[in-house]
Every structure is written in C-alpha cells, then in structure tokens.
C-alpha cells in the first residue's frame, strides 16, 4: 500500500470518527497529504503551523490507524507545506554537493576542516595535511605524540578521511591499538601460518594509521611481527602514521630497532593548548552545541583556561552548560555566577578567573572605582590607574599571558597590557611609596 492509498483509508475512518469535528475534517484533513520519506517516517503535510496546532490532538488516532493498516508502528509527524518544501530543497543541495566518488562519504566526523589550529598543534596539523595530500612521498613514518585529549586521534582520522576521499585507489587502514592487540593475541594463539597471513594482510595496505601505539609496547611477540611490517612499509615507500602519548625516546617496551624506525620520518608533538587556541575551540564548541545564551568574557576565559589541558573536558563543560541552558531558557547570559554553580566540583583554588575578579575588586576598592569601570573604556586617572595596576597584578600573581589578560579586561589589546605592566614596573622602581602600596595590595589579594 502506498502512502496515498494509506491516507485515503485513514481519512475514511476519520470521517466517521466521533472525535473529529466536521469543520476540522473539511478544513484540515481533506487538504492534508501523507508523505513517506526514505527513513520510513511518515509526515502529514498540512497548510500551516496553525493547522498543526488544531490537529495535533488527533495524532494518536492517526498513528493507531496507520498501525492498523500497515501492521506495524511508524514514526509519524505533522509538517507544514513550507517546511516540507524547505526540507526538500536542502536535501537536493546536499545531494548535489556530494561528489560522485563512492568513497565520498566520510567514515569519521573528524576532519581537517573542523580541526582548530593554534600554536600548540600547528606542526602536527601541517604534517598531517602534507601526509594526507601526498602519502608515501616523504616522512615515513609520521609520528605524532602528546597528552590525551589534544587531537591525535582527530588528526589520524582526518588523514584517513582525506586519503580515502582523494586517493580511493590506495588501500588505507585506520587501526586503534586496541583492535590491533585483539587481532594479534588472536593469531598468536593459532599457528605460524596465521601469523604470516596476518602480516601479509597488514602489508597489503598502502597507508597504515595506528592510533595509541604505546599500548603495543611491552607485548613481547608483537615486536617481531611489527618489525617486519614497519620495515615493509618503509622499504616500499608506503605511508605509516602513528600516534602515541609519549615520544619515541620515552616509549619503553619496544625493541631499540623499532624505536629507531619510529624516529626515521617526522616526529612531531601536540602540546597543551595555548590560551588563544583554547578560546577558539571553546567558542567553536559553543556554536556546535547550539547554545542559545550568550557567554560572558569571564566565563569563556574561565573554561578556556581551566580545560585547556584536554579538549574533551572543554566539550564536556560545554555539554554541561548546554544542558543547563535548555533547562534555564529564561537566563540570557552564562556568566561567572552560572559557571561557579555549575562547576562546584572544581576546587576554588582553580578558579583563577574568579581570582582576576578578586584582584579587580581589591584594587578597585583602593582606588574607589568599580570592577565594571576597570573593564570599561573610561580613562579618568583613577580608573586608568586601577586598571593598570590590576593588569600588572594579574600578570604578576596569576601569570596569565598578555593577550589573555587583555581579554579578561573587557577585550583590550595585548599592547595595552604591555604598556600597563611597564608603567607599573617603572613607577615601582622610582616611587618607594607606590611600591609599598603594591606590596600591601598583593598580600591582601594572596591572603584572601
Ligand atoms: P587524543 O586522541 O589526543 O586523546 P582526540 O583526537 O580524541 O584526542 O580529541 C578529543 C576530542 O577533542 C575529539 O572530539 C576531537 O575532535 C576534539 N579536538 C581535539 N583537538 C581539537 C582541535 N584542535 N580542534 C577541534 N577539535 C579538537
Ligand atoms: Mg586518541
């Protein structure tokens, strides 16, 4: 039964149903159209949003009728004609923009396009792109190392996506160490032939990407197997890519000869995110997760500063905010108050951005100006002095970077911060009383 026939039958039963008002039937049911999409979902297209509101109470009855006629439950929704048109248009665009290659569908969502580049990951990012564009031409192997959550797997999967997309003729394999160890343990239990055919299978690839290679260390027999495999790739100019949480030199548990091979191509590291990159990733994540509320400077900085050691934690913190945001739609801005209630588990010693606020408060009190005016643009002597001294103290006590301080003070340029710090240092050198004032304020801030 196609959807037109199905809808006819349902209309029939609705026309005789007591719960359907005649006017509703004539105005909204007779004019509606049932459409099934390729996900096996049924949509009833109606005239307007208002029509949806009117016939929503009938949803149960319609779903039951569909079930009765088809013999199984389906997903069913109301949709306006305008919405339907828009969906169709978007669908067409997606289809049209898809390259014809059967390899065009990406296996992983991690891509170069959604990797955010910064000082800390620049080298690894560039090296990965070069490898992806020209696998097997230089740098065999590429070895990327760094702490957890800094984007190693992301880069390996992006290489995989790019190579399978642009060079479908190459046989490419992405392996997690976990799955590799399972395979190895499995063949080791079998006979010599099993080991040989396993080696041959891996050596049949042109591009081999192994994630978290550190887990393969200290597995005695695997050394032998992988030595053969890695040599085969190197000798035949085929691309190898490894990721690890340690540099080759610190990878204990591998034979010296394997370590040497890790180091033969290009070894590059990803470091803990610098502040600017952390801010960019945090902002991107806020966009990705579609948070409706705006986020204050301080809140953004807080997240970027305290989760910079692991992008997963940034994502986790945004998920937490997103969930909170949905429940508290009336709140228009996520500020430090929200953050400090949401992240109660974070020890207050870590609340560095709150410390920035504390610095501003204590200095502001001394100069008789508000935190708001310290963050603002006014340049009256008292405000400017309080601003400069606060910047100096944040640098001196909390050791934040210049551009970070700029952001923390209402989005000022880092040169403004340099000038402020220099000015205060000069004053302290020439004016003993001023120096004393600064020392007292510093003690006060540190003792709070
Ligand atoms: P690792 O393998 O180093 O432990 P992952 O690659 O799994 O880290 O990264 C953790 C998460 O953070 C993933 O969702 C990844 O997409 C994301 N991520 C890491 N670095 C970046 C970056 N520079 N830009 C965008 N997303 C990133
Ligand atoms: Mg990983």
Image (tube, rainbow, N blue to C red):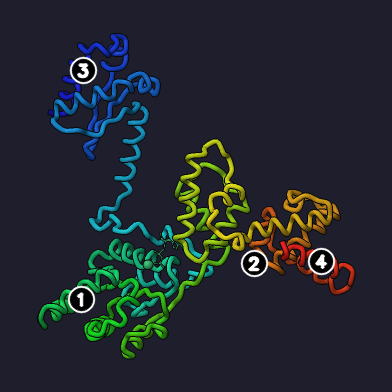
Labelled pair 4, 2 in contact (Cβ < 8 Å): no
Q: CA distance from mark 3 to mark 4?
A: 83 Å
Of the four image quadrants, the one with ligand 1 is bottom left
> Where is mark 1, residue-wise?
184
Q: Earlier in the sequence, mark 2 or mark 3?
A: 3
Q: Which x, y percent locates residue 82?
A: 37, 28
Which sits in the foreground, 90 or 441?
A: 441
Labelled pair 2, 1 in contact (Cβ < 8 Å): no
Residue under the image location 11 percent in, 78 percent down: 190
Query: Any atom of ligand 2 within 8 Å of the CB at mark 1?
Result: no
> Where is mark 3, residue-wise?
11
Task: Say what secondary structure mark 2 lies in.
Answer: loop
Q: Earlier in the sequence, mark 3 or mark 1?
A: 3
> Where is mark 4, residue-wise?
440
Q: CA distance from mark 4 to mark 1?
A: 65 Å
From the viewer's perspective, tell me whether residue 414 is left or right of residue 131.
right
Q: Which x, y percent locates residue 7?
A: 20, 23
Task: Answer few, some or many: residues within 10 Å of disc 2's Cα (few below 14, many 20 plus, some between 14 and 19).
Answer: some
> Where is mark 2, residue-wise?
401
Residue under the image location 35 percent in, 83 percent down: 262
């Amino acid at each position: 039964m196609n959807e037109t026939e199905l809808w006819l039958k349902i209309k029939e039963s609705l026309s005789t149903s007591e719960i359907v008002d005649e006017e509703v039937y004539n105005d909204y049911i007779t004019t509606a159209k049932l459409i099934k999409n390729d996900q096996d979902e049924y949509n009833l297209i109606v005239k307007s949003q208002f029509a949806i509101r009117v016939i929503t109470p009938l949803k149960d009855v319609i779903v039951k009728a569909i079930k009765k006629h088809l013999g199984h439950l389906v997903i069913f929704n109301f949709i306006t004609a305008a919405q339907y048109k828009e969906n169709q248009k978007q669908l067409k665009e997606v289809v049209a923009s898809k390259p014809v290659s059967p390899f065009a569908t990406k296996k992983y969502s991690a891509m170069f396009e959604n990797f955010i580049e910064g000082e800390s990951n620049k080298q690894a990012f560039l090296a990965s792109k070069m490898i992806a564009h020209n696998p097997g031409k230089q740098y065999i192997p590429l070895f990327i190392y760094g702490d957890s959550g800094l984007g190693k797997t992301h880069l390996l999967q992006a290489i995989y996506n790019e190579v399978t997309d642009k060079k479908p003729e190459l046989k490419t394999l992405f392996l997690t160490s976990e799955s590799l160890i399972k395979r190895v343990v499995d063949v080791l239990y079998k006979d010599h032939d099993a080991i040989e055919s396993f080696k041959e299978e891996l050596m049949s690839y042109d591009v081999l990407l192994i994630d978290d290679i550190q887990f393969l260390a200290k597995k005695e027999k695997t050394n032998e197997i992988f030595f053969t495999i890695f040599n085969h790739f190197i000798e035949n100019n085929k691309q190898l890519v490894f990721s690890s949480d340690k540099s080759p030199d610190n990878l204990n548990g591998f034979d010296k000869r394997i370590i040497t091979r890790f180091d033969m191509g290009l070894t590059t590291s990803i470091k803990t995110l610098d502040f600017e990159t952390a801010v960019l990733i945090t902002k991107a994540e806020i966009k990705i997760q579609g948070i409706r509320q705006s986020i204050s400077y301080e809140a953004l900085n807080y997240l970027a500063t305290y989760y910079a050691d692991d992008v997963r934690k940034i994502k986790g913190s945004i998920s937490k905010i997103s969930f909170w945001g949905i429940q508290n739609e009336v709140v228009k801005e996520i500020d430090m108050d929200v953050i400090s209630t949401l992240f109660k588990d974070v020890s207050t010693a870590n609340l560095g951005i709150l410390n920035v606020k504390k610095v501003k408060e204590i200095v502001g009190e001394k100069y008789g100006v508000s935190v708001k005016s310290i963050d603002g643009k006014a340049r009256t002597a008292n405000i400017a002095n309080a601003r400069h001294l606060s910047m100096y103290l944040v640098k001196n006590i909390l050791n934040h970077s210049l551009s970070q301080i700029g952001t923390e003070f209402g989005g000022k340029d880092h040169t403004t911060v340099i000038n402020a710090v220099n000015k205060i240092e000069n004053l302290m050198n020439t004016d003993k009383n001023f120096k004393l004032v600064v020392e007292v304020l510093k003690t006060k801030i540190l003792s709070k």
